[in-house]
Image (cartoon, rainbow, N blue to C red):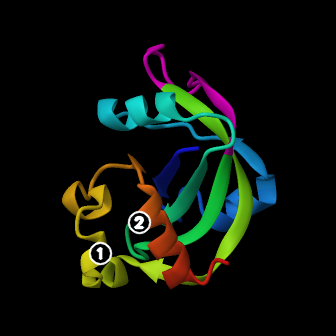
Amino acid sequence: MARWLVKSEPGAWSWDDQVRDGVTAWTGVRNYQASNFLKAMKVGDLAFFYHSVDEKRIVGIVEVVREATADPTADDPRWVCPDLKAVRPVPNPVTLAAIKADPRLADLALIKQSRLSVMPIDDQSWDILCGLGGVG
């Protein structure tokens, strides 16, 4: 099972929206690298749900419940979207500042490619982030 991080602007789609709807198509990604990561997601993979812009923090965990298909919000079939299901909130949201302050997380794409909206998270970093967030 792979692990990921997906970003959303809370004013456009928040963790509360995700929880309310349960399962949603992760639409609107228009970056080739991020789209390739969406294509690599498999059913059962988990992802951190990250509020970008003003909040800049991990607030929840979602699960891939359907692999990527054509994004209905795009005219170009190269853009895809998987379906993600809300799994659980992160009890202690993990801020970008806390992530940057932890030297064990220095190689995360979240730090090195800050504008990327979908990215893989290695197992060790996943465990560290879960620990910081109080996820048991």
- Dot 1 or dot 2: first in sequence order is 1
Q: Could you tell me residue 133's position as x and y percent?
A: 55, 81
Numbered tag placed on residue 91 in the rendering: none
Q: Secondary structure at mark 2?
A: helix
Q: Is residue 72 magenta?
A: yes
The type of residue carrying mark 2 is Ser
- Residue 104 is labelled as 1
Image coordinates for residue 20, horizontal then vertical, percent: 79, 60
Task: Name the one closer to the observer, 131 or 90.
Answer: 131
Disc ID at residue 125: 2
The magenta stretch is 64-79
Mark 1–mark 2 contact, CB under 8 Å?
A: yes
Q: Quadrant of the N terminus?
A: top right
Place residue 69 in its image quadrant: top right
Q: Nearer the viewer, residue 93 or 10?
A: 93
What kind of element bears circle 1? helix
Q: Position of residue 64 (x, y in %)?
A: 66, 42
**Magenta stretch encompasses residue 85:** no
Q: How packed is label 1: few (under 14 Cα within 10 Å), some, or many (20 or more)? A: few
Depth order, front residue of 94/29: 94
Question: At x 48% / y 64%, what residue is drawn?
Answer: 126
16 versus 102 height, above or below: above
Residue type indicated by callout 1 = Arg
Rendered position, 114 above or below 136? above
Q: Which residue: 30% across, 82% down?
A: 102
The x, y position of residue 118, in whole percent, is: 42, 47
Does 101 sit above or below residue 84?
Answer: below
Indicate the quadrant containing the C terminus: top left, top right, bottom left or bottom right: bottom right
